Structure formats: C-alpha cells, structure tokens
C-alpha cells in the first residue's frame, strides 16, 4: 500500500485516526444532551422552594405562648400608643426571692410575666395629669435618678412603680467576646 504524500507542515500521525474515538463522542453528547427545558424546570422548582420556605417562615402565627418580636411586645403593652410614643414597651416579671442565712439558701418564686411600659423622665406629666402619681412620688423618684414604669391600662388603676435602669446587667447576647460593644442604650 502506498501512502499519500505528506505536506510540509503535516505530522506523520495526521492521517491516522484513533481506533476508538468513542470517549470524545460520549463526553460531547453528554454536554450536548442537557436539555434547556429540563434546566428551566429545575431552576423553577428551586425558586419555588425558596419562595415556599420564605412564606412559611414569615407566616408563622404569633398567637401562641412565644413572643417573637418587638412589635408583638409593643402591641401587648398597656396603652400601646402612649407607651411607644413616650417611653418603651416592656416585659414585666414579678417574682419574690427568699434568702435563708442558716443554712444559706436562696429560693425564688415562679415568675409572673405581663406586659408593661417604662416612661422617659421628661414624660411623667402624663401620669401627673391623670393624678396617678403624687408630687411626693415624683420628688422621691427624681432624687434617686429613676423613672416610672407601669402595668395595666392607665384608665383602670394601673400598678405604677419607681424603677431604675440597671446598666450593670447589660445584654450578654450583644456583648460577646470578640465583638464591638454596641452604642450605649438610651437613658430613660
């Protein structure tokens, strides 16, 4: 058998082909076999799954025993409009502590949680106008650099107390090691 003449720039292996050229055919047919319709359906299912996940997580009912957000606390506060405008809504925990000295033990009652409100110092006039606090109570609370907080609506005999802001407790969720301290809390 006579071989065809080679050109100047050709290789001696140019005229020979691999006996099994199936590998390159398979890989190209695999890539070429991706159906754009199938890819669009998969992308649609993925996006639909994200949408359903978001809808389920944001549509949770807050009527249960869990307090999920600040908005729930604001709505539950006594006189919510006054509380949000002139102070801050709060969760009030009533409990008693019993301490024995011999032997030394500490006993705590079951806490009673209820909605409440803390007023800013410059808004005490709301309580004074409705004659819910006396001048003497105002003087005593001012002398101790405190403020007033209350539970129950202002129209139906609320429980009002002189309270102080305890800055030493801090929010341990925000002041974790290695984090920058957030801005100081607003003084009431």
Image (cartoon, grey):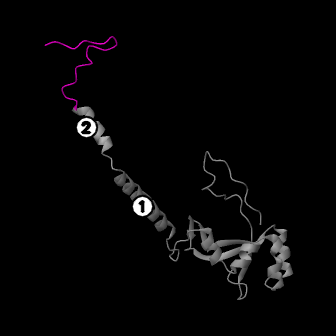
Q: To which residue does mark 2 refer?
A: 26
Q: Is residue 44 above or below residue 72?
A: above
Disc number at residue 8? Answer: none
What residue is drawn where x is 49% and y is 71%?
60
Q: To which residue does mark 1 refer?
A: 49
**Element under label 2?**
helix
The answer to whether residue 20 is magenta is yes
Quadrant in which the N terminus is drawn:
top left
Magenta-tinted stretch: 1-21
Q: Are marks 1 and 2 in contact (CB under 8 Å)?
A: no
Specify the principal SS of the magenta part: loop
Q: Is residue 6 above or below residue 101?
A: above
Near mark 1 (Cα within 10 A), the count class, few <14, some 14-19 or many ≥20, is few
Where does residue 114 sit, x and y in percent of width and height?
Answer: 61, 77
Mark toward the start of the polypeptide (1 vs 2): 2
**Element under label 1?**
helix
The residue at the far left in this view is: 1
- CA gap between label 1 and label 2 equals 33 Å
Q: Is residue 68 left or right of residue 12?
A: right
The residue at the far bottom in this view is: 156
Q: Quadrant of residue 117?
A: bottom right
The reply to whether residue 162 is visible in this rendering is: no
Q: Nearer the viewer, mark 1 or mark 2?
A: 2
Q: Is residue 80 left or right of residue 29?
A: right
Q: Quadrant of residue 79?
A: bottom right
Q: Is residue 103 left or right of residue 74?
A: left
Where does residue 17 sit, x and y in percent of width and height?
Answer: 22, 23
Where does residue 175 sit, x and y in percent of width and height?
Answer: 63, 52
What residue is drawn where x is 32% and y is 42%?
32
The answer to whether residue 166 is magenta is no
What residue is drawn where x is 73% and y is 84%?
154
């Amino acid at each position: 058998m006579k071989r065809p003449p080679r050109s100047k720039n050709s290789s001696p292996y140019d005229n020979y082909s691999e006996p099994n050229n199936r590998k390159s055919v398979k890989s190209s047919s695999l890539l070429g076999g991706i159906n754009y319709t199938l890819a669009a359906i998969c992308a649609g299912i993925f996006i639909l799954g994200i949408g359903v996940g978001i809808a389920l997580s944001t549509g949770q009912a807050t009527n249960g025993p869990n307090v999920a957000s600040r908005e729930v606390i604001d709505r539950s506060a006594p006189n919510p409009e006054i509380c949000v405008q002139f102070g801050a809504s709060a969760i009030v925990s009533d409990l008693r502590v019993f301490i024995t000295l011999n032997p030394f033990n500490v006993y705590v009652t079951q806490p009673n949680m209820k909605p409440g409100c803390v007023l800013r110092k410059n808004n005490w006039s709301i309580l004074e106008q409705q004659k819910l606090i006396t001048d003497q109570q105002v003087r005593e609370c001012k002398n101790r650099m405190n403020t007033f907080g209350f539970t129950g609506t202002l129209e139906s005999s609320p429980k009002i107390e002189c309270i102080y802001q305890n800055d030493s407790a801090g929010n341990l969720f925000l002041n974790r090691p290695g984090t920058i301290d957030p801005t100081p809390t607003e003084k009431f």
